[in-house]
Amino acid sequence: MQVHIAMLEKLGKESEVKDGYLKITEKRLLNTSLYWYERSIRNTLLMMGALTTRFGKSKVPMPGGCKLGERKYDLHIKILEDTKAGYGNCAGCCRMGYQQDRSLLQNK
């Protein structure tokens, strides 16, 4: 969970833990590109889906390994491709976006 919170903060959200609750606020427009240099496992792909759903586009680093070693993420990519959004890899990152109709995700 701490990795997700740190990623949200990197995108522009603010977080606060108080009395056992996590409060996440957004006081400015979020970035649609996540620049993350820590090990991300598959967390970046989760951020990619959320950003694309909300903004119609996203750019995140390719998933990395973890202490257990490299793990496949092809199922995550398949699900993202099934949304009919454009998807591609470039220079160590994944890009995703809709050309025209963002409502495609609503039917899935």
Image: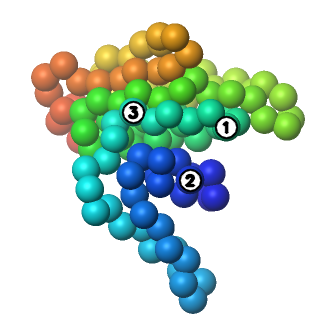
Badge 3 amino acid:
Ser
Cα separation between marks 3 and 1: 15 Å
Check residue 24 in the rendering and tell me which mark sits there, or answer none.
none
Q: Is residue 18 visible?
A: yes
Identify the residue at image location x=38%, y=52%.
Answer: 12
The x and y percentages for residue 74 are: 60, 21
Task: Report the residue marked by disc 2.
Answer: 6
The x and y percentages for residue 55 are: 25, 39
Cα separation between marks 2 and 1: 10 Å
Task: Report the residue marked by disc 3.
Answer: 33
Viewer-side residue, 55 vs 17? 17
Badge 2 amino acid:
Ala
Return the disc, 3 or 1, that comes first in the chain's sequence.
3
Identify the residue at image location x=64%, y=58%.
Answer: 2
- Quarter occupied by the N terminus: bottom right
Q: Is residue 107 visible?
A: no
Return the disc, 2 or 3, that comes first in the chain's sequence.
2
Q: Is residue 26 above or below residue 44?
A: below
Return the disc, 2 or 1, that comes first in the chain's sequence.
2
Task: Report the residue marked by disc 1.
Answer: 38
Kindly indicate the quadrant of the structure image that contains residue 62.
top right
- For disc 2, the neighbor class at 10 Å (few under 14, some 14 to 19, many from 20) is some
Badge 1 amino acid:
Glu
Most extreme residue toward the bottom, as rendered?
A: 19
Identify the residue at image location x=41%, y=37%.
Answer: 49
